[in-house]
């Protein structure tokens, strides 16, 4: 996510770090690079102009020029201005209404609106412990109603049955009535999208809005459309009293133009972003964390939250107890760690949140993918229980059998065993008294400035 922008900004700001002092001249050169980086990221031109001008005003001030570390001070200025553009903090959904609170979803066709309805329903059920009912008011797109019903079953929320022959307002009112009878906390209404903005579409969704009076009217937009996302959001904002924006497909957006443009152009906060195809792949939009990611500082808070949600605490405690007793770390434990990593959004998703990943060579980053994790799981699954418990017995003939059984090469098996050996050594250090503290102290020096460690 935002790889191109992170790489370009990182290179520019890294050059400034090495400067003994900053002058108007080298700040001017750096800001030219920042401007090009933002334009290449498809950030809207008015946003780029305002951003660069504010950074210039602060950068040539006494605070930066007289700082002992002017390069780092300028990075702080850029980070502060990124926050100004995207919003100071996450703005939560306003659910303080007499139940059921109604959420109305709007957006163009193909933006991922229906999938986002299901993701949001799951998020509300799991994180906020809300009873959610969803309904489709899209009577135009073939199978739109059936698609939402299938997704509702997958995320475990209630679904209001509707038919394409009904009017959207009638469906919305029926869903609201059913929500009251079933004591639902939240009703989410999916609406019809179009391939482009047209007056007929706007008239229909305005009638829907008037009929149900939602507490939240959320505009769902594909982040990969760049500054067009911001322009479309503005058009919807002129027609509807939008309360927020949800960016979809952010995991595939290497540029980041939409995230940096929408808030500035519409004045509406980005409340969530979709970060994958799975129904659990929805994150609240935290501007401070996104700014840190863009500047290559990682997103440690989101990483911690991901670990807390994704890790099976019982299994983690069992492994800790096992290591404490000196029983050692085996390949079955290694496989369990791989499974839990996959449950937390995969290796690539975790790497995206780690500090300093942007500084890794491109070749190294390309090797980090979830296909490798799946391959490693397949290799371990091809081993016998005895081989998993006692990896030292895995010699030539056994390695050939395991490779054949997992559809891999002997080199892949050798590589996995080497990685396991390294993991085993690390686990031995952690299991010793003070091992984790020593490991964290070792990592501390590698963290970028400003990290809370």
Image: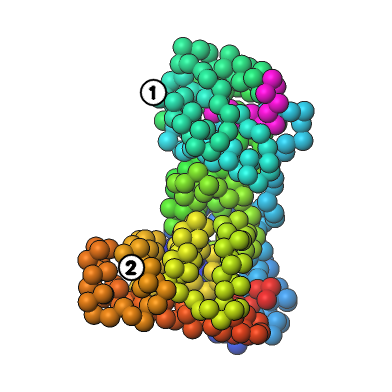
- Closer to the camera in the image, 356 or 411: 411
Q: Which residue is drawn at 56% across and 70% down?
A: 319
Compared to residue 211, the image places residue 289 above or below, namely: below
**CA–CA distance in space, label 2 to label 1:** 47 Å
Q: Which residue is drawn at 44% across and 57% down?
A: 254
Please give the label number shown on residue 49.
none
- Closer to the camera in the image, 101 or 19: 101
Q: Residue at x 47, y 78 (%)?
A: 423
Q: What is the span of residues highlighted in magenta in the rendered image?
A: 180-190
Q: Can residue 113 be seen in this view?
A: no
- Closer to the camera in the image, 225 or 158: 158
Tell me: 88 left or right of 368. right
* Magenta stretch encompasses residue 188: yes
Q: Where is residue 39 in the image (x, y as percent from the top left)?
A: 47, 57
Compared to residue 361, the image places residue 148 above or below, namely: above
Please give the label number shown on residue 383.
2
Q: Where is residue 29 in the image (x, y as percent from the top left)?
A: 52, 73
Colour mapping used in the image? rainbow
Residue indicated by mark 1: 142
* Magenta stretch encompasses residue 325: no
Count of labels in the image? 2
Quadrant assignment for the C terminus: bottom right
First along the sequence among labels 2 and 1: 1
Q: Where is residue 73 in the image (x, y as percent from the top left)?
A: 66, 76
In which quadrant of the rendered view does residue 387 lie? bottom left
Q: Which residue is drawn at 39% across and 23% down?
A: 142
Specify few, some or many for label 2: CA neighbours under 10 Å numbering under 14, 14-19, or 20 or more.
many
Q: Where is residue 343 in the image (x, y as percent from the top left)?
A: 50, 56
**Which element is circle 2 on?**
loop
């Amino acid at each position: 996510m935002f790889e191109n922008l992170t790489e370009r900004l990182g290179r520019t700001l890294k050059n400034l770090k090495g400067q003994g002092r900053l002058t108007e001249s080298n700040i001017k050169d750096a800001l030219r690079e920042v401007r090009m980086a933002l334009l290449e990221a498809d950030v809207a031109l008015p946003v780029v102009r305002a951003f660069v001008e504010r950074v210039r005003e602060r950068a040539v001030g006494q605070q930066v020029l007289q700082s002992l570390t002017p390069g780092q001070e300028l990075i702080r200025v850029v980070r502060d201005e990124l926050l100004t553009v995207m919003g100071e903090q996450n703005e939560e959904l306003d659910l303080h209404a007499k139940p059921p609170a109604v959420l109305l979803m709007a957006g163009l066709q193909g933006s991922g609106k229906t999938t986002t309805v299901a993701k949001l329903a799951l998020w509300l059920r799991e994180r906020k412990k809300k009873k959610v009912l969803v309904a489709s008011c899209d009577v135009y797109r073939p199978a739109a109603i059936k698609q939402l019903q299938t997704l509702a079953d997958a995320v475990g929320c209630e679904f209001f049955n509707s038919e394409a022959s009904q009017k959207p307002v009638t469906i919305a009112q029926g869903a609201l009535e059913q929500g009251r009878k079933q004591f639902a906390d939240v009703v989410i209404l999916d609406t019809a999208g179009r391939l482009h903005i047209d007056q007929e579409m706007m008239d229909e969704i305005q009638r829907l809005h008037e009929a149900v009076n939602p507490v939240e009217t959320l505009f769902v937009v594909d982040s990969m459309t760049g500054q067009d996302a911001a322009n479309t959001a503005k058009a919807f904002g002129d027609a509807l009293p939008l309360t927020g924006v949800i960016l979809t497909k952010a995991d595939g957006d290497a540029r980041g133009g939409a995230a940096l443009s929408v808030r500035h152009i519409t004045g509406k906060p980005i409340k969530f972003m979709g970060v994958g195809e799975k129904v659990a792949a929805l994150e609240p939009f935290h501007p401070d964390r996104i700014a840190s990611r863009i500047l290559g500082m990682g997103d440690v808070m989101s990483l911690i939250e991901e670990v807390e949600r994704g890790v099976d605490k019982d299994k983690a405690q069992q492994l800790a107890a096992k290591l404490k007793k000196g029983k050692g770390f085996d390949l079955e434990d290694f496989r369990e760690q791989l499974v839990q990593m996959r449950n937390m959004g995969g290796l690539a998703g975790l790497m995206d949140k780690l500090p300093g990943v942007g500084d890794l060579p491109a070749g190294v980053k390309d090797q980090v993918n979830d296909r490798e994790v799946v391959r490693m799981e397949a290799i371990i699954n091809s081993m016998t229980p005895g081989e998993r418990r006692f990896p030292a017995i895995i010699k030539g003939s056994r390695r050939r059998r395991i490779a054949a059984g997992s559809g891999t090469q002997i080199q892949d098996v050798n590589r996995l065993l080497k990685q396991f050996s390294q993991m085993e050594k690390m686990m031995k250090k952690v299991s010793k008294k003070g091992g984790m503290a020593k490991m964290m102290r070792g990592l501390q020096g590698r963290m970028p400035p400003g990290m809370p460690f």
